[in-house]
Amino acid sequence: MTAWRQGCPESIGSVGLKEVSSLAYPEPAIGPTAWNTGLASVLIACLTVILIGPLIIGDMRPLQVSLFILGLYILKVTAAAIWSTRVSAKEANPGHLPFVSVLIPARNEEQVIATTIAEVAAQDYCGTDGRPRFEILAIDDASTDGTGAILSSLSACYGQLRVLTRRAIDGGGKAAALNAALPLCRGEVIVVFDADILIARDFLRTLLSALNPAIAGVQARVRIYNRNEHPLAACQDDEFAAFHKVTQLGRDALDGAVGLGGQGQAVWAAALRRVGGWHTGASTEDLDLTVRLVLAGQRLRFCPHAVVWQEGVTSLPALFRQRRRWAMGNLRVCFTYLWPLIGAPIALRRRLDYAVYLTSILTPFWLLLSYLVLNMRLLFHQQSALGLAPVYIVVSAVAYFPLLLTGLWGEVTRSPLDLIWRVARLWGYSFLWIPIGLAAIWQTVVVRTPVWDKTPHAGLQRGERLLIGQGAVDGDA
């Protein structure tokens, strides 16, 4: 992808000052400001003792029951996702189009930022007078490459674009960049993208059609646009198509733990300001915002019809660093909010669902610990190895396969042989979460030093252009 698209389109509506030089505005108060292990640590320790402790004396029942319940839960979510796709239709566009502020934080994104701005600027989200009902605020977050210069040139081409420039001394990462832009937003709704996206022209219109005053925010579906260029990127696309889409669909249908992501989230500005914006101490500011909105009594929705395409990483070290950061952020959110979530004045099913959502990151730790305990027991007790009863194996292990089949069939493939291959590949790929999860637990619980690993973006290959923005690709391979 070239860093600059040749030529400038005609201006399609000015929305005021195009460049703002930054940080004359105070950040909103963000809380909590400290990571308090406290009661959450005690609760997680108790869960560990309940699950693993009985294995020492050869009692498999707590582990069996837990796996059985987990399997039933996965089957329930999958069934709800299937049901929701059969009974729901694309929602009609609302009569009132709320004005939207699109925030795009960018640090050293010269390879992708021009295409991202062009994709957003080309949206057909316009009023009856034909004028755009959105603005774009791009945040040059202390870039040391050509990102700032590209954005400056782009601001002369796109009437909706304003540029906010931050300095290295400002710090705070993505959350701080978003908070710096928040006081400048004129929109009733805030939409957040990273700098590496491709979207259809009707993306904003489709996403906003799922947002109403009864909910605080809505999340789009995520796909990987370089899935055909590298097998690792293809695995990530399968992962998003299966785990992300199906679990979000099912939880949405069950009024459960829908989560906001870093790509394609839309939140009412009033709701966002009420909870204090984004938490600058969180490496996964999207999950942190999700839980704080839920604790404030808000509901979130998932919109499968709005698809945002992002770039997948193409090396194992880069994937490990990216997912370790995600897992560390999940752990910190878990330890920070798990106990308040348990006692929150919201529906019990939603509390339990979000608790499962947050603690699921500890699954690799529990599985490895149970394996070690069972093997250590064999060293001191010379007897036949303990095993799970067949019914637990069927329900807990096989429960994942309907989820994978539901996500992949029709989404990324319509070939039975290809489907079998993709399920097997994704099953193997999922084992990467064991070392990733353990590394995140070590870094979070033992080292306690936050690690920020920026994911580099290379953009599309030279001469290649996915016509997602022109509607030639609509989410199907």
Image: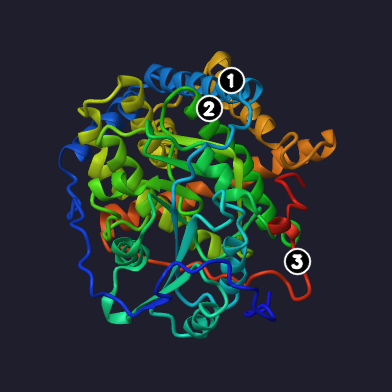
Q: Give the label on residue 250, or none.
A: 2
Q: Label 3 crowding class (10 Å Cα cut-off): few <14, some 14-19, many 20+? A: few
* 3D distance between C-alphas at marks 3 and 2: 33 Å
Label 3: which secondary element:
loop
User: Where in the figure is residue 91, as x and y percent of width and height?
Assistant: 58, 32
Decide: few, some or many residues near mark 1? Use Cα within 10 Å; few <14, some 14-19, many ≥20: some
Q: Which residue does the numbered mark 1 point to in the structure image?
A: 79
Name the residue that disc number 3 marks: 465
Q: Residue at x 59, y 74 (%)?
A: 114
Q: Nearer the viewer, mark 3 or mark 2?
A: 3
Q: Looking at the image, is mark 1 or mark 3 nearer the viewer?
A: 3
Who is closer to the viewer here, 289 or 326? 289
Residue drawn where x is 51% and y is 59% of the image: 320
Task: Write the residue at 34% across / 54% down.
Answer: 442
Asked if residue 2 lies left or right of residue 417, the reply is left
Q: Pinpoint residue 366: horizontal percent, then vertical percent.
A: 39, 36
Q: Residue furthest front?
A: 129
The N terminus sits in image quarter: bottom right
